[in-house]
Image (cartoon, coloured by chain):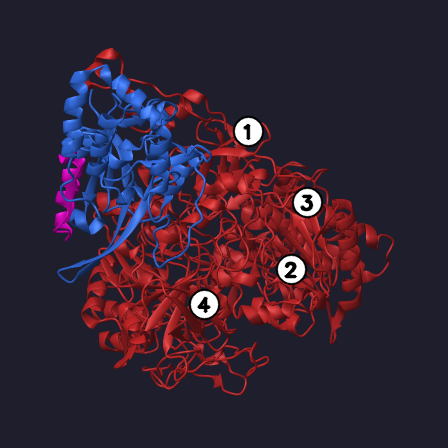
Amino acid sequence: MKVSRRDFLKATGVVAGGLLLPTGSAAAAAAGATATIFPLHKRMGEATSVCPYCSVGCGVLVATDVYGHIVNTEGDPDNVHNRGTLCSKAQSITQLSTDPKRLRKVLYRAPYSTTWEEKSWDWAIARIARRVKATRDATFREKDGEVTVNRTEGIAWLGGAANNTEDCYLASKFARALGIVYLEHQARLCHSSTVGALAPTFGRGAMTNHWVDLKNSDVFLVIGSNPAENHPISFRWITKAMEERGARLIVADPRFTRSAARADLYVPFRSGTDIAFIGGLINYTIQNRLYNEEYIKAYTNALTLIHPDYQGPDELDGLFAGYDPEKRTYDPATWQYQTEKVRVKVKERDASGNEVEVEKEATVPKQAASLEDPHTVFSILKRHFARYTPEMVERICGTPRERFLEVARIYCATGAPDKAGTILYAMGTTQHTVGAQNIRAYAILQLLLGNIGIPGGGVNALRGESNVQGSTDMGLLYQDLPGYLGLPTVKQPDYQTFVAKYSKTSFWANGPRFFNSMMKAWFGDKANSQNNFAYDYIPKRSGDYSFMPMFEALHQGIIKGMFVMGQNPFVSGPNARFEREAFANLDWLVVMELFDTETASFWRAPGVNSAAIKTEVFLLPAAAAMEKAGSVVNSGRVIQWRNKVANPPGEAKEDIWILDRMMRAIKAVYQGSTAAKDRPILDLVWDYGDPPQAERVAREMNGYALEDVKDTSDKVLVAAGGVMPSFATIASAANPEAIACGAWIYSGYWAPADDGTGVVMPAARRRGQNDPGGVGTHPYWAWTWPANRHIIYNRASARPDGTPWSEARKLIWWDATQKKWTGYDVPDFPITKAPDAQGNPAGTSLAAQSGTDAFLMKPDGKAWLFAPSGLNEGPLPEHYEPLEAPVANPLSHTQFNPVVKVFDTNRGQDIGDNVGAPDRFPIVCTTFRLTEHWQSGAMTRYLPWPSEAQPGMFVEISKALAAERGIRNGDLIEVVSARGAIKAIAMVTARWQPYTIDGRLVHHIGMPWHFAWQGIARGASANDLTPHVGDGNTNIPEYKAFLVDVRKL
Amino acid sequence: MSRLAMLFDASRCIGCKSCQVACKQWWGLPASETTQVGTYENPTDLEPNTWARVTFHEYEANGQFQWLFLAWGCVHCTQAACVDVCPTGALKHNALGFVSLERELCNGCGYCSQACPFKVPRMETVNLLTGEARASKCTFCQDRATNGLTPACVKTCPPGALEWGERDALLEKAHARVEWLQSRGYDQAQVYGETELGGLGRLFVLTAPPEAYGLPVNPQYSTLVASWQQVVQPLGYLAVAATTLGLAFNWLATRRARLSNIEAVEPDATEESEA
């Protein structure tokens, strides 16, 4: 960015200061004071970057000293997200750059050694490559039964959410080329259930709206999140809405939080009862007819008819039809749509190339004429949620009936077409055995109220890490590939079966093209249409390789070697004592980090006999965010490019350099091999320059033309070597095999684009300020996936006829004169498809969908109030208690999610997958984060300022519990669960109150989970207490509701 | 020219401590070794290396619970006792409306920290051998402010709870905010700092009475500071002699300032003994 000092001062001066400088001695004399002007005592920076902590994506201006180390940071006033403001963590970036504890050398720990020793990069890389080869060769499996799977379960990969997207893309490519299936990272632990819920409901798994859009909301329902704490800059936009639009802020949380301090209405509810709470709101909306009927009829499957044999929990005591108690799974046969066959006329070309009209038969979902038909989704929904009365909400959640009804009155009023309500949620929602269904409940409520696709609405997943969206997009989860293409499973033994999984009647019909182009990017001409795009070069999965199964496999000794790129599972993993024990089974461990974390130093943790641990550990010093180039994707899917603005300390290196060196070394040790299993490594396209350039990785992710890309009329769309302007080119090209594209959803992010002033640059670098309509879209600021659409599903921001729901809520609309969609955002819809366009049921891709099918990633073009597929525990959310609950489920005899896997390794032993009951552990406990720290503390607990502001572990307890147990504020107490015991300082507070659950008094406490034994700010780890049990779809651990007891020490 | 001021609007504050750390960042102030003692507040007091901090208060009235946050630091009084007692001119009223501090002029006498009705200035020992000290406090980022920039804490504040501008305009805004807050159910919302000690340079919009935030209800300019001024000032240049005398006792005075708990020292008694 070119900013003159003068511009900078203008921008940062903000207010009167600059205009009010004393202009002469008169001013000074008048005040009887001096007019001294003090010179700035240090330099302000003008190099732009993006904060590496949470997912708001705040701009930072950085100043460096002669060594390239950061000496000052300021908020970037031009960044549309933060406009010059920063939180306390971002203010500590200076220390992140200069702290003496930053790793400066490669450290090596030999088997059974008690110390680190310094090594050279060359030595370490060469040794790592040999260890990888030995482990891979010993554990590689070419077949699972008859199916070629080409995978190794002996090597695992963990981490990436704090890395640049380009690092993550390379990590994905690196791991899959090796055949790694245990590929996981932070997203499993924070928002995997978000993707698991939103993708089946809307078609994509991401936050629907974006940070700046919060200013457009009328009512905020903050539930399962604490944005004042974890996303402080969000309050810039929330405050703006409250003051300028009179927006109301509702905070529903087990405790009175920093966010609650600013709320119009705080409402308590017990951890783990979101479905009951939101179910109550859904019921209130339906009973009082507050839903937007026109919206749900046009844009959701409300009118679609479900199988007549469908039965729900209202009839089956908490279960859905099709449950197999032995297998703990469902047969979803009766959850399916009723279908009918229609005969349609379609135009085709005959053998001689002439266009002819032929009649075809197509099967389509059957729709009712009225919502009231007993088999419609809407009727089922109505019956299902009728049980969620305010009285039931009070019994389950412990929320006083009147306060619940106050929430209902305020929030459900946003069903009016000119009102927008938004739900902001995070880990309080996702980390439950019903995590995905919690989010489903939010989505259903928002759909009923017509709050999806509109400014100020949405189901907004607040991501926790600066690039967890990007790392997820790059497929760093066992079941995925970049762009959510899905890693093949053993049930897809060949390419044809695999590509058949993509729906034919949504935009996913282009899935095969996107997959093929990714394989071209990875394996070049070794992947082509003659060899099924080298389908067997990537591994196939047979089971669940997610985070907890990974640690179970570590415990069993299946995993022998492991890469950890910027993740600290020793603090963040559930049942952490068990997971630490499992780690000692590793033969080798490679950690890429900024600091010597608890994970890197697991072999010398308190109480561990180092001399008994065989693991060989390589601790590779990595560059921090400011010290390397690449992109980060914020929660609102905005991909912002960060330049390298500082130097890493000592011999620390960029992650892509480390990955590049490791892959080169691995290729070298496999050189000359003729084994089929080694072809993916040897044939892997790996050419990013030396040293590797993030820009070259970006080009590959974006997609480029291997030869001229042409349309059907032989017109050149992109000349050989050029970058793809959009995934639409991949979808429409006549010769798609000419395209290599590593991550189709990012197609366009690295393409040349105008920044709104006529200056052209790679789209993700843009800093344009234009904001058409003032709605906060900022289409020239960086680049937002998909296709620079900021509010996804924005077709629904207009009525079915294409006019905006209200003038105040205008976003996109149909321009009948120009015959196209226009407005303030890029339409998430075919731009020339008229509102009255008919879908062709026999057509493929979007041709199958009509002018009101606003959810174009769904096979029927509709958002799913009822999900016939995609969720394991049922098509609708049903309240189940957490695995560890203080009461019997008041709603049914189905106590907890009937499909979850409860791990039971070493149950009954001191360290094991133990489960507690309320007789011994009567208190409900949850965990939370603090604004001063970040996640496992790996980038804050080592820094003096954040550590000073929050120096150690504590437990928040109510005054009533304190009185009962004789605990005073500041006392050291012990908290015990079935997994372990920790000591912490008691914080006795009126912010916690006991609950009355189903007529019984239940105490509820909470504690932060940042702490562990290394760094400056130390303390016991909350995750020593949390259980090994996960959500029924994505196995996100249930960190947020478990049972404990407390006692004074 | 109008006076500049800072407005802290407690009804916007989210207690995120960004102001606290931004101050440390801009001024390069080291962290203290703190411990968790059962509070979100850390450090637990202003220190020579902590000029801004956020305080946390649980408050309940009429069945309404509030968690109050206060961004605290020097309030830049119009009747600034610290300026009046400062023998070296290290503390001065700046024409922009704040109390500046030139540490190179400070002799470490500690009068300011003892005279301040808000107990803001803290003495930092700069020489362990001699016990020599320097005063430290928030200066509204005097270098930024006099170069047309906003103070670091104001600029960083995520919800805009801290604002910087002409005092008159901020006061007007503060009163409008109070009215708005009262309409939203905060019936105890009020402005603090408008008239206290001649008017503070740091204005507050509060959602509860000042004492709920730990603020003095009616802060007083010490009468002894006033009378001391009345004696000293007419004597004019004799102050130089007093300073010389003071220097003779410098070692003792600074040593005491360092060793004693400054908050516990009765300002009046100190003035008497020095006089």
The percent position of residue A769, horizontal first and vertical second, equals 40, 33
Could you tell me residue A480's position as x and y percent? 59, 61
**B185 is within the stretch colored magenta:** yes
Q: Where is residue B253? Give x, y as percent.
A: 33, 33
Which three-letter amino acid code belongs to the residue tagged 3? Lys
Query: Alpha-carbon distance for marks 2 and 1?
Result: 36 Å
Identity, as a three-letter code, of the amino acid under mark 4? Lys
Q: Is residue A980 left or right of residue A109?
A: left
Q: Residue at x 32, y 46 (%)?
A: B54
Q: Tell me what residue is drawn at x 51 percent, y 57 percent.
A: A936
Q: Are marks 1 and 4 on the same chain?
A: yes
Kindly indicate the quadrant of the structure image that contains residue B18: top left
Q: Tell me how far mark 4 sits from mark 3, CA to CA.
A: 35 Å
Magenta-drawn stretch contains B28: no
Q: Who comes first in sequence, dot 2 or dot 4? A: 2
Would you say residue A344 is visible in this rendering?
A: yes
The amino acid sitting under disc 2 is: Trp
For label 1, the crowd category at 10 Å Cα-Cα, with few meaning under 14, some 14 to 19 and many 20 or more, is few
Residues indicated by labels 2 and 4 sit on the same polypeptide chain: yes
Question: Does A9 appear above or below A348?
Answer: above
- Residue at label 1? A65
Q: Which residue is mark 4?
A: A983
Name the subunit of mark 2.
A
* Circle 3 residue: A105
The residue that mark 2 highlights is: A157
- Which element is circle 2 on? strand
